[in-house]
Amino acid sequence: MAAIPDSSTPPFNDEHAPRHAAGFPADAGATAPVTIGAPTNAPTAASPAGAPADADFPGSYRPVIGRIPILDLRPQLADNLFPAKSYEGDVVPFSAVAFREGHDRIGVELVIASPSGRTRRVRMQPGAPGTDRWETTVQPAEAGLHTWHVEAWGDDVATWRHNAGIKIPAGIDVEVMLEQGARVLDAATRDPQLGADDAAALRAAAERARVASATPDERFAALMDDAITSILDAHPVRSLLTRSDKRHLKVERRLAGTGAWYEFFPRSEGAERQPDGSWRSGTFGTAAKRVPEVARMGFDVLYLPPIHPIGRTNRKGPNNTLTAGPGDPGSPWAIGAAEGGHRSIHPDLGTEDDFRDFVRVVRDNGLELALDIALQAAPDHPWVTEHPEWFTVLPDGSIAYAENPPKKYQDIYPLNFDVDRNGLYQEVLDTFEYWISFGVTLFRVDNPHTKPLQFWEWVIHEVGAKHPDVIFLSEAFTRPAVMQALAKVGFQQSYTYFTWRNTKEELEEYLTEVSKETSDFLRPNFFVNTPDILTEYLQLGGPPAYRIRAIMAAMGSPLWGMYAGYELIENVARPGSEENLDNEKYEYKQRDWAAEEAVGRSLAPFITRLNEIRRAHPALQQLRNLEVHETDGDSIVAFSKHLAAEHNPAGVADTIIVIATVDPYVAHETTVHLDLERLGLVPGDRFDVEDLLTGRVWNWGDDNYVRLDPREQPAHVLHVRGRTA
């Protein structure tokens, strides 16, 4: 094995050298040895005159806890190596645990600074009783790295109001309480941000509270006047001010968090079988004719499998056979031939200029283009001869091919990232830059879990530093910790286990997991199928199963996707596998989209309606707001998405309730028990709901009867129109 190149050479510094956490400025998240009891960013406190500063503790120990404890800040990744993630328009919950000794009241505030330097202060409110957790939400509108912290202080006004409200009516310590109230107002007048009129009003109220000839009730009323209360609420009197350490939130553009993806093979779009049985490949020119229909269905992203030359050695034939005929095109993921590798275009598809024209058509139709990046090579790839050090050589001198037991990929060599690390890293970065130059703005990355996590951290942030709008989608069907780590180090979107979650219990658990437990860093893209995945549920469930899964994906996540052919119910599997028979990975597929739709055999109109609903309802463009509701039985799932009026550009609340059967075979009935508080309503309310799939309207309440027949209508997608009683 060759030695690793000198770590001082670009593009990568040695792993033992000082480094900053991904996504943070070099001075914002740097890690350094910390002495217990002496934090590098200790809280500061505003103390009364004569009180010691935090740095003036006697002895040698300095507490890590500020004068008012501020703990368990959220959102924050457990290891705090990377920032929490968000996207433009995302409603982000912030919280912290804060308390003080005794019974005096405190105030808590979120302070968040945008990348452009605008600082916003948001008062936090108490959470669940007894938890000492304080909460608020923020909806960031600016992409970039946001810095935030929490401030807590002794709320002298609230403490006085509480005590005075008990003692003065009871005749206890009346003079003391009135004078304390007057002094609180005196302190409030020293706020430099207080206007002259407000300061004068506070001084006048303090004077009235000190008029001995007035009754205690009159003096107390002067301190509790509504105008005085409003001034003090806007300008609280803070003592013992304590600040938490800073945290970070990485906000990315909207398409990173919400959008619909559609995948097709350009070689199949326009492909024709010739009279002699051979095929003429589709091209970028013929594929461009399909783009307007993808746009009409309401998709945001068109995703292409690899478009590079395909290896001939060990080329796979139809249905993954090991022997290919002379006209078999091979798998696009077996990248590399005499015509070139990862920075080359398959000559059957066209030229570089043809690809630029295709990208232009995609953009003209309101879509963005995603390209598959598969970091592996066919035996014919130029890398094999030019850079044999980028592969793993076995003791017999052969190069190891790819395996994902029980699957074997004899047409693919995996890469070895640890021999010529810097050389291979730079080659891949240059490859991303090459395709970005054509206008590619999204990359679906094949099997990223089979490459070093450190590599992805590096390359995604190198690309992001120059092209912050570029989005990476992780195709990692692997262990949860690995999948989640890929999201933490930079992948904006992730494939998930949704494809294999089909029962009521599985769906309820998984929807809750992705919307609550991992939503600070992992954005789930619910693909309903892929060229590799045709689940048993889809194989056996027929059109109802296809409708059910599309509804669950499109309504359950702000991100969802489908592979071409889903709308045609292509559900015949190769025996013993989860792959389509006559898989498009290994051969051309000719479809007559218009003819299938004309005779009612296409789900395209149904898919179009789902995407219309998604675009019309901003509640569906959020992830964290999903709430599962109780239903009787084990065949019908209910969940909702609610967006409060203050977070909706339209200025009104938006609420969607989805009720779906998971059984594609027979009808079921149930009672849906709604938690109305999760819908912005009050228990006992009555309200109208409109089914956005059929237009029917019902009047609902806490408990509602539902019957669903999957052959007629497998789900209700209900819009809450408003209270009726």
Image: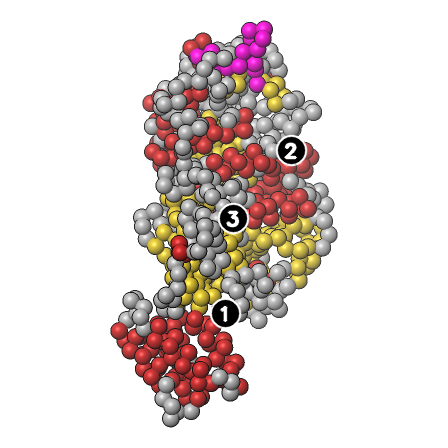
The stretch drawn in magenta includes residue 400: yes
Frontmost residue, 611 versus 478: 478
* Element carrying mark 1: loop
Let me know if residue 65 is in the magenta part. Answer: no
The mark lying in front, picked from 1 and 3, is 1
Which type of secondary structure does the marked residue at label 2 adopt? loop
Which residue is nearer to you in this view: 263 or 225?
225
Q: Hey, which residue is sitting farthest top in the picture?
A: 396
Q: Residue at x 66, y 59 (%)?
A: 673
Which amino acid type is shown beneath numbered disc 3?
Answer: Leu
Q: At x 38% / y 72%, what residue is drawn? A: 232
Q: Is residue 87 visible?
A: no
Residue 27 circle label: none
Q: As displayed, is residue 479 above or below residue 128? A: above
Q: Main secondary structure of the magenta part?
A: loop
Q: Nearer the viewer, residue 40 or 462?
A: 40
Residue at the spot 46% in from the left edge and 42% down from the top edge: 34
Which residue is disc 1 drawn over?
104
Q: Nearer the viewer, mark 3 or mark 2?
A: 3
Where in the figure is residue 12, as x and y percent of width and height? Answer: 39, 26
Q: CA distance from mark 2 to mark 1?
A: 59 Å
Circle 2 is placed at which residue position?
Answer: 535
Task: Specify the segment rendered in magenta.
Answer: 387-402
Query: Pointer 3: what residue?
Result: 623
Q: CA distance from mark 1 to mark 3?
A: 37 Å
- Residue 510, percent from left and from top: 62, 44
